Image (cartoon, rainbow, N blue to C red):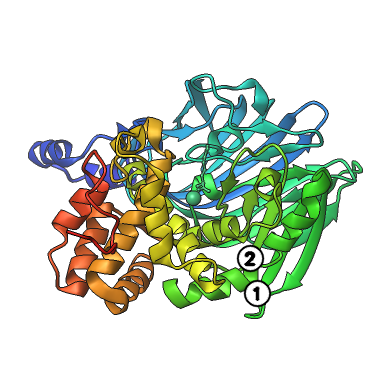
Amino acid sequence: MSLRAKLTLGTATAASLLLLAGTATAAEPGAPGIGDPYYPNAGNGGYDVSHYDIRLNYQPTSDNLSGTTTIVARTTQDLSRFNLDFLLKVSSIRVNNRVASFTQSGGELVVDPKQSLRKGSDVTIVVTYSDVPSSHAVDGYTAWKRTADGALAIDEPDIAQWWYPSNNHPTDKATFDVSVAVPDGVEVISNGLFNGTAKQINGWTRWRWRSLKPQATYLTYVAIGQFEVRQSTAPNGQPVVNAYSLNLGENELPAKASVERTPEVTEFLEQSFGPYPFEAQGGVVAPGIGFALENQTRSTYDPAFFRRGANTYVVAHEVAHQWFGDSVSVQRWRDIWLNEGFASYAEFLWSEHVGEGTAQENAEYIYDLYPADSAFWQVLPGDPGAADLFHGAVYDRGALAVHALRVAVGDEAFFTILKRWTQQKKYGNGTVEEFIALSESVSGQQLDELFQTWLFTPGKPAAAPGAATFA
Ligand code: ARG
Ligand code: ZN
């Protein structure tokens, strides 16, 4: 019984008691998904997280990960119970300091607090766990990557559930403290500011990292292993932390010749995208990732990107994601073009900047690369489907769509659109439809046909954007 009901009991008439019963809303379970059409189980309903404190221990030789994640959240409905997204075996949960019961299956951790939670109330959830992340697969895939000397919690769209419980969707961002204790001689890299190491009494060393700006769950990462860690200061005064695996072999120097230029690339992209939105910079190069990923403030790169020598294009791509993807995140995963189309277009801008081909030349090159009968032209960047989230068309045709916009509205309106988008949506989320609406309002042009052609129509468009046509 609630306190309010108790207080009214003394003087209540039968009629007012009935009224009370009639208007009280029963607490309901939070939804197991946040409503993303591509990933129905991603995220959860009924609460909003503001902070994660992830405090773990990791033993590379056994892949055992154990510790506690503390979640500070607020309820958005009366909740009888709620879900977290998590695969590892949980040993205990407390909700507002009281032991809660829970069940786990299929990546959903269902938490039953002793008392239901009122809408709009602060809630602190402490989850304690111990498990071997590499022993878990979802649809046959294990996102947690063991390496020769450690592990990488790096993937998109999904990595969080392999190492910490969360509301796993980009629409619920939060700040993070991440700390991992490891045997001496192992390094741990994560997002944001480095808060130093602390020697533990068991002989292990704890590495502490902190993200001050809202961060999506999939962009929160750890790289554990043997790394050379380089700390410096960017021209804008921000801390730069780069880390290079000690297992890069002949890729080590080209990786450094690329990733060390992160502050220069950041400064360059600020001219097109507006002020850099975060508190720190950097990059990590480690074997075993298999791709590059724009982890917030500190992108990660597979050394294969540097196999043929320095590669500043991949750096431009990942740094561009800090605005397009990390600060402004997808509202639904269907909006992935807002990430990959723009990060790929940043490579065109960088190419022009370093005198290796204009954006126009890059657009024509890409357009000509794929013959009209190629399956490439059948994937729609504006709605590729979950299976083709990272299809080449989302990147390459996606960049052509961005260039088509630039050609149609002119440079002044184009760069106004980009800066206004990153400003208006800073630390938030956006949809393709919202981007189109902004483009139309800034340019004063009707752009439905343009975006329909480049984002939503199967088949090769008649000509490259901006190409001279010979009728
Ligand atoms: N956003 C990353 C990039 O463009 C792509 C990550 C691809 N993810 C994957 N699991 N293959 O650089
Ligand atoms: Zn990308």
Tell me whether circle 2 and circle 1 mark residues in contact (CB < 8 Å): yes
> At numbered mark 1, what does the secondary structure look like: helix, strand or loop?
loop
Q: Is mark 1 within 8 Å of ligand 1?
A: no
Above or below, comparing residue 297 to residue 442 in the picture: above
Q: Is residue 467 visible?
A: yes
> At numbered mark 2, what does the secondary structure look like: helix, strand or loop?
strand
Residue tagged 2: 281
Residue 19 image-quadrant placement: top left
Q: Amino acid at mark 1?
A: Gln
Taking the spot 37% from the left edge, 49% from the top edge, the residue there is 368
Q: Is residue 81 visible?
A: no
Taking the spot 22% from the left edge, 54% from the top edge, the residue there is 451
The residue nearer to you, when weighing 306 against 148, is 306
Q: Position of residue 212 (x, y in %)?
A: 57, 64
Taking the spot 15% from the left edge, 56% from the top edge, the residue there is 448
Q: Amino acid at mark 2?
A: Gln
Q: Position of residue 3 (x, y in %)?
A: 33, 45
Residue 159 image-quadrant placement: top right
First in residue order: circle 2 vs circle 1? 1
Location of the N terminus (image quadrant): top left
Q: Position of residue 191 (x, y in %)?
A: 63, 56
